[in-house]
Image (cartoon, grey):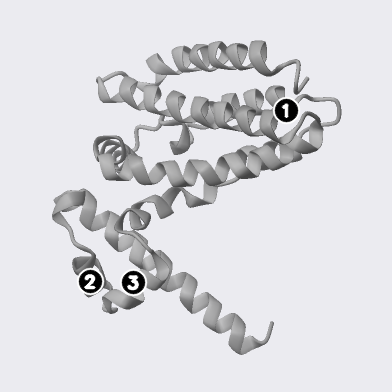
Amino acid sequence: MTDETGLRERKKQRTRQALSDTAIELFLKHGFDQVSVADVAAAVEVSKPTLFRYFPAKEDLALHRIADHQGEAARVVADRAAGQSPLDALRAHYHARLDAHDPITGLNDHAVVRAFNDMLYGTPSLLARLVRYSERDEELLAGVLLETGGDALIAGLAAAQIITVHQRLAQENWRKLASGRAIADALPEAHGDADRAFDLLGAGLGVSFP
């Protein structure tokens, strides 16, 4: 990569981040449905066509905040310790993320994170768009699971169940905090919910992915 190419890429990354950050700030201040793509483009001083080159849909402006987690489940399985099963690796990783109050688990009470999750779970179009992100997560995880055994169908079904469990746990954790509970109070229950969920996954998938 030449210096000029690297400079262009860094500029694109800065523009992409500026668009997402500005959009989220406007969405949280005024409401997702009240802010248009034109509003975001104007705030960053780019044209609408330029914005759409970075983000094909308005919802992607918001979901870019969680894009760095895409493929995380696949990475956890691929990087697991020798002799550790995929489900055990995912379970341990999820518990660690809970203890770290990772926003992706839904168990984070930082004001901006709470506001973002309120917007995410309260906006049907964002939840619908999230499905596309989930499909990519499933594809990546299925690819890694396929390398551990089974066939493509079983790997795909397993990946779909695992990603769905992660999302449902996050949404349930968000509900805990949205109801007014403190993290210290909700955390033990969140760990228990995760164990119950992974136990169910293990009962159904353990034979295929021991």
Q: Quadrant of the C terminus?
A: top right
> Residue at 70% across / 22% down in the picture?
88
Give the camera-side residue of 23 and 125.
Answer: 125
Per the image, label 3 sits on a secondary structure element best described as helix
x and y percent of residue 139 in the render? Answer: 61, 43
Q: Identify the residue position indicated by label 2 in the image.
A: 43
Disc 1 vs disc 3: Cβ atoms closer than 8 Å?
Answer: no
Report the mark closest to the observer, 3 or 2.
3
Residue 205 falls in which quadrant of the image? Answer: top right
> Residue at 19% across / 67% down in the picture?
39
Disc 2 vs disc 1: Cβ atoms closer than 8 Å?
Answer: no
Q: Identify the residue position indicated by label 1 in the image.
A: 86
Report the mark closest to the observer, 2 or 1.
1
Residue type at tag 2: Ala
Q: Quadrant of the N terminus?
A: bottom right
Cα separation between marks 2 and 1? 44 Å
Cα separation between marks 1 and 3? 39 Å
Residue 200 falls in which quadrant of the image? Answer: top right
Residue 86 falls in which quadrant of the image? Answer: top right
Residue 201 is left or right of residue 168, and the answer is right
The mark nearer the N terminus, 2 or 1, is 2
Q: Identify the residue position indicated by label 3 in the image.
A: 51
Q: How many C-alpha atoms fall within 10 Å of the one at disc 1: few (<14), some, or many (≥20)?
A: many
Residue type at tag 3: Leu
